[in-house]
Image (cartoon, helix red, strand yellow):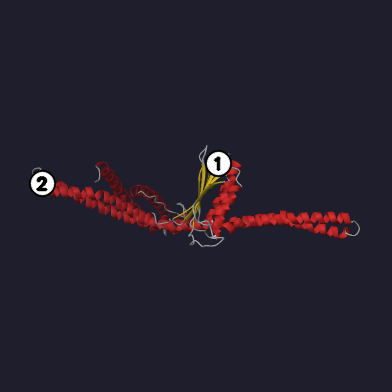
Amino acid sequence: MTSIRVWLLAAGRLFASIVTAMIALVLLLALVTGFVLVPVLGLGVPVVAGALGATRVLADLHRQEAGRVLRVELVASYSSEPGWGWRDLLACLRDPQNGRDVVWLGAHAVAGIVVFWVLYALLAAVSSLAIGANGPFSVLTIPVLVLVAVIWWTVPWAVRGFALLVRLLLAPDTTLARRVEQLTESRAAAVDAQAAELRRIERDLHDGAQARLAAVGMALGLAAQAVRSDPDRAAALLEEARADAGKALAELRDLVRGIHPPVLADRGLVGGLEAASLLCPVPVALDFDLPARPQAPVESALYFTATEALANVGRHSGATRAWLRARYTRGRLTVLVGDDGRGGADPRRGTGLRGIERRLAAFDGTLHVSSPPGGPTEITMELPCALPPPVSGPSSPRTTSCSATV
């Protein structure tokens, strides 16, 4: 049952809609007049530009009010800015949203006029019947009450009708456009992350293994020259070359582990996270519940993001304990890294968290950071994925729930 206060608010909104319908009619007439005058030395350009600017202001007001009525956020995307020149006018005319605004002007004006005359007829009928009634129990009392009930019911629904008209014409569904924009951003982030990873590999190879192998080649060349004249120096050079070759091999192994760690390939995400937890300088409580092993790209993304989050715990948090959880629910794989440190983590100020966010975005994943000053900090990483059915074998994933502290 609609309360009197709610009904009065709806009546005020309906009255405002009827008033703005008259304004919309005036703006329509201004637009038509302006277009007629455009060929006459361009006299209609400022008229059309002013009417389009006023239309946008009126549309914005109605979007806000309709959003309150429907309890949704109604937004519109304009590709032009109102102005007084030819170029500004042409840009506005090419803007699809301005076209929708003009269509709404006509629809709103017609709807406002119709609602006005309907309400006027109902109120006139109520007044006429009330005047004709001889007492509270007159035969005309029942029609009066019926008309009052009709008005009581009509006003809120008329307000909702105006709001739905705004939603239909002034706030088109932008879900697909936003989705395309998100995918474009995530694709760009993936390309940037891949380029950064390739630069890191190139830098590590150039500064590490490549330099070591070049030193090995030089040492072997010097040893070949000294093998007859100075066998002791040749032996020392060969030992130096052997040591450099061992270091180059170790650096190549580290580089390969950075691309795809063997523990991740052998033991899956659960085993990889357990191994990463062992490297954290604070005790980490583990809690995993994964029904199957995710696909390799998803597994790798979550492993590296969780490893980076654990590294941040050791470097920046000042924590005495941490926790790591992994769950799979409703088609989303979630990994949470938390600690009892000082808090204050902010993706906008830390390149590490931004890197995590970019890596997740490449897979349409999300990052949520809860880190109030004083802690605790919890970093939640989510990726949409469909887990394959569990398989059996020595390298099958850990599919049972497990809890531990390492």
Mark 2 belongs to which amino acid? Gly
How far apart marks 2 and 1 lie (CA) works out to 84 Å
- Most foreground residue, 233 or 201: 233
Few, some or many residues within 10 Å of mark 1 (<14, 14–19, 20+): some
Quarter-of-image position of residue 210: bottom right
- Kindly identify which residue carries mark 2: 132
Q: Position of residue 151 (x, y in %)?
A: 21, 49
Within-10-Å neighbours for mark 2: few <14, some 14–19, many 20+: few
The type of residue carrying mark 1 is Arg
Q: Nearer the viewer, residue 134 or 277?
A: 277
Mark 1 lies on residue: 321
Is residue 242 or residue 155 the one in the foreground? 242
Image side of residue 111 versus residue 208, left or right: left
Labels 2 and 1: the sequence-earlier one: 2
Placement of 276 over or under 385, stated as above or below: above
Residue 325 visible in the shown view: no
Residue at figure coordinates x 19%, y 48% from the top left: 149
Residue 158, given in percent of the width and then of the height, sits at 27, 51
Q: Position of residue 373 (x, y in %)?
A: 52, 37
Q: Is disc 2 in contact with disc 1, using a CB cutoff of under 8 Å?
A: no
- What secondary structure is marked by label 2? helix
